[in-house]
Amino acid sequence: MTWKIKKEVLASILEFSKASYPNEFSGLLIGEDNLITDIYILPATQNYAYSSVLRLDLAPLSTSIIGSVHSHPIRSGRPSSADLKFFSSKKINVIAYYPFDFSSFSVYDSFGKEVFLEVL
């Protein structure tokens, strides 16, 4: 399956990541089938230099939440062990990393395998 994302959604992810720097940014991905159409920022999310705390109990009950997104304030999109554990409950996971441009992101499936993301 080829995953796709609307260019304006990826641009928003990169802008949120820049605005949160030097801390991480995190949120949930909204979409249907294999298309990411929006991001959802959970209330009460706490972003730190090397982690984020998401209040998943505040997430809407919706089948349109298909994945996660977060940033790394370093030049690496490699997932940490904590990232891999969190990925296991999501279909698709995006990591934006410094310097947060259109070539500074990595995408992983629920098993932590890197996958291709087509930008529309």
Image: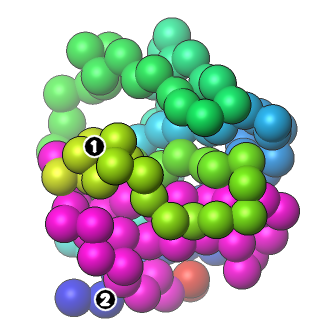
At x 21%, y 88%, the residue is 1
Query: Above or below — where is 79 with respect to 5?
Result: above
Q: Earlier in the sequence, mark 1 or mark 2?
A: 2
- Disc 1 and disc 2: Cα gap in Å? 21 Å
Q: Which residue is mark 1?
A: 86
Looking at the rendering, the stretch of residues picked out in magenta corresponds to 89-118
At x 45%, y 21%, the residue is 53
Quadrant occupied by the C terminus? bottom right
Q: Is residue 57 left or right of residue 5?
A: left
Q: Is residue 20 left or right of residue 76?
A: right
Q: Quick one: SS at disc 1? A: helix
Where, by quadrant of the figure, is residue 10 drawn? Answer: bottom right
Q: Residue 26, percent across and down?
A: 53, 38
Residue type at the position of mark 2: Thr
Q: Is residue 65 visible?
A: no
Give me the disc on residue 52: none
Q: Nearer the viewer, mark 1 or mark 2?
A: 1
